[in-house]
Every structure is written in structure tokens, then in C-alpha cells.
Amino acid sequence: MKPEEIESYLLQSLNMALGSQMQGETSYTNSFSVKVQGEGFLFLPRLPAGYIIDDEFYQKIFLIANAALYPQYTLLKQNSVYFVPLATDDIHVQRGLFFPWKVGISKRLIIPDLEEFVARNFGTKIPIMKHLSIDFEKVTSIAIAGNSGSGKSYALTYFLSILKPISDLIIVDPKFDTPSRWARENHVSVIHPKKNRSKSDFVSEINEVLSQSLNLICERQEILYDNSKHQFTHLTIVIDEVLALSEGSNKTIKESFFSLLAQIALLGRATKVHLLLVSQRFDHSSIPVSVREQLNVLIQIGNINHKTVQFLFPDLNPEGIVIPIGQGTGLIQIINNEHPYQVLPLLCPTYYTKKGIL
């Protein structure tokens, strides 16, 4: 469709849905208009107006336009009203409500052979969906959340396979499950529970490894002090089911675990030390708030509602976001200078790999 056709279609949709709620003010009475731009569209109110322009009004337009534009465009959900100034001296139309979009809808990657796919060498790029990838050079930490059976382990195996050629890996597997089998197949060491050892003893072993990683960060910081352009090998600390570590362990050991995680999350970015954390939820009992604030790739898989998104996306109202149906679907947010600060519908890659891992 041409921009003017989209504008006409949007105006018709908004007039029909908003007319009764705005005391009859419509585009036919010159109360508002719509302008399509490359990265989204503008809702242009003519003020003074007989309706209140607030977050609730912005979200109403989002709900109407997102359904009307699907599947040609996907509107990117904003946490609050998105005002933009307009280049005009007319005070009546000096502002607009911007609704950013991406062309099309999220589409899943289908990978017939994961080993062959990894061998293509994407550099530091991690393909997530068609037309969406993550640059690991700009990642601080990654979080994958989801209820049991949502596909977290399947997604984690994909990330481990993609990261292995570009990063050293430290894997912690409290359940002694999928990550351990992947590590065995790929000759990567893994920390997992052993017989006749207490929970606190297991977490103490993890704390020792985290402490060594923190020392590595300090050593690399000294190198950067003398040479800010020095290139380090990536190191990724992968912890599956973080909640299983923080629950039931000795209070002192748990506090040490939290402190080490927080320091690595805060200091690791410049020295290319990353966290990849997996948990059913990321509340204050699973990781420190300071760690959650450093996460810049947020993935929520499975059931999406106000309750499930409250920890990774505390300011997000998921209403109106079209979540695809199927296994390994949910939401993703990438926070860096390449991607807009919005949440996207997610379809995790479908891949086929060696038998016995999953």
C-alpha cells in the first residue's frame, strides 16, 4: 500500500473506533489527522480539543492501529505516550503522537542443521529471528525467563551453540540436565551437583568460579587502563535455573553469590565478561535488582500476561501486543544504540541438532 492509502485506511479505522469516545470529534471535523513516515505514523491532534491526550488515549490508538495494520506492520509498544515536536509555527498542530513500527511481523528462523548453521560464521552476530540479530559485542547480560515447559532449555541450547565459537563458556547447571548434555557433546566443562554434597557446598563451588571471573575482570581493567583499545576474548557465564541456586542455600553463601553476580554484571561489559541467566522468574529472590538493571537482552517465553512480565518488563502493559501461537514464543527486548527501546513479539529459532541433547 502507498503511504496515502495507509493514511486513509488508518483514519477510517480510528474514526470508527474513537468517534463515540471523543464526543464526535473525528478527522471529518478536522479534529485530527494521520501522517505516515518511514519508521511509523503520527497521530496529529488539532488543539484545543474536546478529548484528553494522555497515556490511556495513546494506548487506545495503539490497540486500534496495531490490529488494523497487522500483518503488514507491527507497532512497537511504548511504555507511555510518545510525543514528538513538529516543525511549524502553528501552535494548534505543533505536536504529534508517534507510533513506531517495523515492516511485517516477527518470523521464526527454521534451521535444518544447527551445526552447519553455526559453521557459517556470523561473527559476533547472534541470529534471533528473520531480520533480527544481536551483536554480542554490545551485550552486557542476557536473561531468559519462562514457565516450565515453555522452551527455555531449547532456547538456551541454541544460544550455547551460537556462542561457543565466539566466547569462552562457564556453564552452571543446577538440574544436571540439558546444558550438561550439551557441554558433554561439545567438550565444555560444566559445574553441576554431585552426590553426597550439600546445596550450600554446590553454591560455594559456584562462588569460587565467580570470584575467579571477577579477578579476571580486574586484571582486564588494568590492561584497559594502559591500552583502551585492547581486544579481549569474550567470556560468558551461563547459569541455568538461577532460582534453584538462590533458594534453600545458606544465607551467607547466598549473599556472597548475589554480591559476586552484581559485581560481574556491573563491571563485566568493558572487559567482555557476560552473564547469560535462565530462570522461571527474575524476582528479588532469584537475582539482585542491580543485576536485573544491567540486563540488556530480555527474553520472556511462554505465557505472556501482566503477572509473567512484571519482573523483566516492569513498566510494560502487554495488552495489544500480538503474541504468536506456538512453542518458544514470547517477547524480546534488546537495549542498545542499534535497536529502538521497544518490546517485540518473539519466535525462538526452530532447529535440529544431535540426538541425545534435548
Image (cartoon, helix red, strand yellow):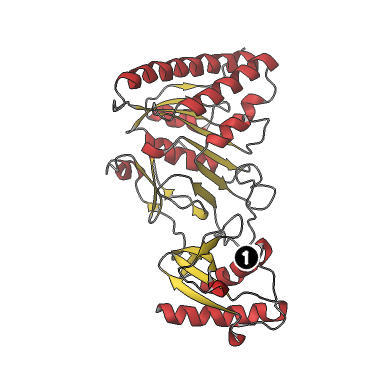
Give the tally of numbered discs.
Answer: 1
Outermost left residue: 120
Say which of 282 and 343 sits in front.
343
In screen coordinates, is 109 left or right of 194? left
Give percent across and percent down for residue 141: 48, 35
Q: In which quarter of the image is the N terminus?
A: bottom left
Give percent across and percent down for residue 9: 51, 81
Q: Judge the density around disc 1: few (<14), some (14-19), many (≥20) Cα neighbours within 10 Å.
A: many
Outermost bottom residue: 28
Residue of label 1: 58
Give percent across and percent down for residue 29: 61, 86
- Identified at 58% across, 28% down, the residue is 175
In screen coordinates, is 339 left or right of 33? left
- Identified at 44% across, 59% down, the residue is 107
- Identified at 68% across, 51% down, the residue is 306
Say which of 58 and 309 sits in front.
58
**Up-down: is 73 above or below 239?**
below
Residue 49: name its quadrant: bottom right
Work out whether residue 195 can be spotted: no
Kindly identify the amino acid type of the residue bearing the numbered disc 1: Tyr
**Up-down: is 335 above or below 69?**
above
Work out whether residue 282 can be spotted: yes
**Up-down: is 350 above or below 93?**
above
Outermost front residue: 89
Give percent across and percent down for residue 182: 43, 32
- Identified at 62% across, 63% down, the residue is 320
Residue 217: name its quadrant: top left
Which element type, helix, strand or loop, lies under badge 1?
helix
